[in-house]
Amino acid sequence: MSESQSLSGQQSKEKLILISSIFVAGLCSIIYELLISTTSSYFLGDSIKQFSITIGVYMASMGLGSFLSRIFQRDLILRFIEVEILLGLIGGSSVPILYFVFSDLNYVAFQLSMIGLIIIIGILTGLEIPLLARIMKEYYPLKINLSNVLSMDYFGALAATLLFPFILLPWIGVFLSSLVFGIVNIGIGFLNLWFFRSFIASAKRIRYLLSAAFVTLFFVLLAIFSQQLLQEWHDRLYRDRIVYTKTTPYQTLVLTKANDDLRLFINRVIQFSSTDEYRYHESLVHLAFAKSDYRKNVLILGGGEALTAREVLKYPDVEQVTIVDIDPEMFRLAKEHPAIQEINNNSMADPRVIPVPEDAFVFLQQHPALYDVIIADLPDPTNESLARLYSREFFKLVKKRLVPGGVFVTQAGSPFHTTKAFWCIESSIQAADFEHTYPYHAYVPSFGDWGFIMASDRALDTTQFKLETENRYLSAETIPHLFHFEKDMRLDTVPHSTLDRPFLLDFYLEEWRRWARLNVERQ
């Protein structure tokens, strides 16, 4: 082989390494952005705000990084390797850092840490492309060089946006994903360090090899002990012993247990306590059933743990119960987890129950069946995806799926702690053309004072109730009192929430954060 052929072959390998580095660099940087946004959304809710902050700060920081790249004039390949090792260290550590900060510090410290991480990652990412473009100018003319660099970076970003929701989040989780891609980022540094070793002084090469190896070892150890670390961090966030935890593509589920008290949390928000859940589920179901002329065909939106279904199945005239829950893992827990099976009376085994793993909004749009009673047992509106399930548009779909004279009831949060949010939900139901709405509330010790709203296109008498089932909490004599609200829980004019203007989310987050701050100050 001639010297010119050997040189050409070497240059081809160098170009391949650099182009591959661009692709992986673009992939890793977007993964970090998605990981930080997702983790912040899990902890703080309001995913649009968290993703907006991340994107805005990240893009500005990238611009700053690109501007600062002009400082570097020599040893560009070495500078690129330094950036990759630092980016791997900071990006790979980002989720563990956020977990630690959230469990040990407060909301402000978490938000500042999140923004700090985004700025550092953004600056380092902004350095990557200019450095690589300047390194590759030796191989291509400017026009081709820029198109190669930018196109491979964009393709890497596309790969990240496909990998994250379909593979990383459901199968690996945010914590391990950050460690894996930290190692990948450092691997790019390793690869370039080895391949361009002839351009780098021996002492520096050894120093960077040791740095990269140390960071990689650190991440490997974190990955090995990730379950213990996550368990410890979760234990700080939850009062009782954690018996089950899983992050699904939709949410993080945690079951805790203390003596006979089993609790389910979704994204850290309590869904039920086995000691008093009957108060909530009896209040949600039996008032609506007492005022329903027919209840053969019942639709439950949410409630995949089948506790609402347990109450519905007490009525012998119920012929079909359709439960729509977006997360199939909820149905699996209801069917297979012994403790939940015991609480829900094995309701999922009842042939009348039809589980449908689908988004409630999509289900109402695409399934034209009519129901005698519709029950919304949905999580609180902690983010945009959930807030849309309390919008005027959603309630309009609910009304279309009710038989004439049918009854709808929804849980509506705490009329004491989230007063604006509670009355906003009623206002949204009214805006959906329900002619009659009936807000009421019940005391559930693990929740506090909890609210519900019943609605129909016909007038319902709330002064008298006849109960047809044996209940632990409700009685016909006390139910009328549930419709009375004390003065400090009443608001007269609250705007309704829509898909375009989700006021409910703002009200809910504002009110819960106010109570959270008060609790911290009291401690």
Image (cartoon, rainbow, N blue to C red):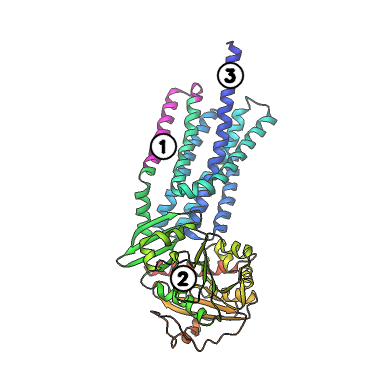
- Could you say which disc has been placed on residue 9 in the image? 3
Q: Nearer the viewer, mark 2 or mark 3?
A: 2
Q: Residue furthest left?
A: 259
The x, y position of residue 504, in whole percent, is 57, 69
Q: Which image quadrant: the N terminus?
A: top right
| Tag 2 residue | 308
- Could you say which disc has been placed on residue 216 in the image? 1
What is the spatial separation of the Cα atoms under label 2 and label 1, in whole angstroms?
Answer: 48 Å
Question: Mark 2 or 3 closer to N-term?
Answer: 3
- Could you say which disc has been placed on residue 479 in the image? none
The x, y position of residue 74, in whole percent, is 55, 28
Q: Secondary structure at mark 1?
A: helix
Asked if residue 28 is positioned above or below residue 503 in the image, the reply reads: above
What is the spatial separation of the Cα atoms under label 1 and label 3, in whole angstroms?
Answer: 31 Å
Question: Mark 1 or 3 closer to N-term?
Answer: 3
Mark 1 residue type: Thr
| CB within 8 Å, label 1 to label 3 | no
Question: In percent of the image, x 60 and y 18: which residue is there?
Answer: 8
Q: Over which residues does the magenta segment extend? A: 195-221
Q: Residues within 10 Å of mark 1 (few under 14, many from 20)?
A: many
- Compared across the picture, whether 277 is left or right of 3 comes to left
Mark 2 residue type: Thr
Q: Nearer the viewer, mark 1 or mark 3?
A: 3
Residue 19 sits in quarter: top right
Q: Secondary structure at mark 2?
A: helix
The x, y position of residue 214, in whole percent, is 39, 35
The x, y position of residue 84, in whole percent, is 50, 36
